[in-house]
């Protein structure tokens, strides 16, 4: 049976706080949260990235679905279900950015430092899709507006990177320049995040028992 690791909201908060100083060095202009696991980390992270006298960093959202198939497993006490996730092989775009609307509201991605946030880097398929598709769309928009000379850089933040062979890769220059940040690198375990739990008190208790506080 795959080992299951329980994560509390308190632990998520501390991972974001701990990573914020490193992320600040890149001066992100905008965050793109991958739903649904990237929403809460992005919002917590924004608090720690804000500098006195500055505005909050805008957060945009995209929806990508990868975990679609399930297999039977032992009942999970915090979730009350008897199914374990298996990594899917196809990314399904369920929500995407409206670049024309962003441009009209002075939220253009062109020429910006963009931080893409997700909760976990498992097979890297979702992150690869998000970065490659966003980069393509920004390039098209920049060419259309005559702004191809402006440099757009993408960064990645995840709470957890699973130490395992990946099915997809991120750009070599991103990795070489340190624009990929994982708060923790963990073995290939099943990570149970607090926003997935139906019994948050039990989730927190199990997390604390495992030392994830």
Image: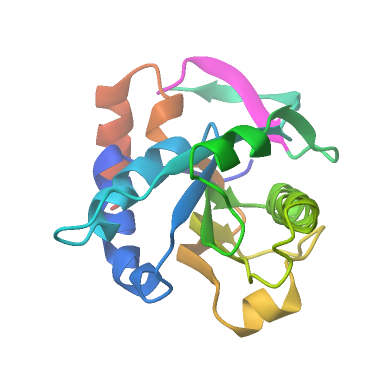
Please identify the residue farthest to the right as the structure is shown.
Answer: 90
* Residue found 24% across the figure and 50% down from its top: 47
- In the orientation shown, which residue stands out farthest toward the left? 52
- Residue 80 in view of the camera: yes
Look at the image and give the residue range highlighted in magenta. Answer: 78-86
Judged left or right of residue 132, residue 195 is: left
Question: Up-down: is 173 above or below 50?
Answer: below
Q: Position of residue 191 (x, y in %)?
A: 51, 43
- Location of residue 64 by image quarter: top right
Q: Residue at x 54, y 62 (%)?
A: 112
Image quarter in which the N terminus is found: top right
Depth check, front residue: 169 or 135: 135
Count of numbered circles in the view: 0
* Residue 57 position within the rendered picture, expressed as x and y whole percent measured from the top left: 36, 50
Q: Is residue 77 above or below residue 43?
A: above
Nearest to the observer: residue 43 or residue 76: 43
């Amino acid at each position: 049976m795959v080992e299951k690791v329980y994560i509390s909201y308190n632990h998520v908060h501390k991972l974001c706080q701990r990573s914020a100083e490193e992320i600040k060095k890149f001066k992100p202009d905008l965050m793109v949260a991958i739903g649904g696991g990237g929403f809460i980390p992005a919002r917590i992270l924004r608090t720690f990235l804000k500098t006195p006298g500055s505005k909050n960093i805008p957060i945009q959202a995209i929806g990508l679905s990868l975990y679609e198939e399930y297999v039977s497993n032992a009942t999970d006490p915090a979730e009350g279900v008897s199914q374990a996730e298996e990594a899917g092989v196809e990314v399904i775009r369920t929500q995407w950015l409206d670049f024309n609307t962003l441009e009209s509201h002075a939220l253009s991605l062109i020429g910006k430092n963009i931080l893409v946030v997700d909760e976990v880097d498992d097979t890297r398929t979702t992150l690869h899709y998000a970065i490659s598709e966003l980069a393509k769309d920004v390039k098209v928009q920049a060419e259309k507006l005559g702004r191809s000379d402006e440099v757009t850089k993408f960064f990645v933040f995840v709470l957890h990177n699973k130490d395992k062979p990946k099915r997809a890769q991120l750009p070599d220059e991103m990795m070489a320049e340190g624009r990929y940040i994982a708060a923790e690198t963990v073995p290939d375990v099943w990570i149970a995040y607090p926003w997935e739990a139906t019994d948050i008190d039990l989730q927190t208790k199990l997390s604390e028992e495992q030392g994830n506080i």
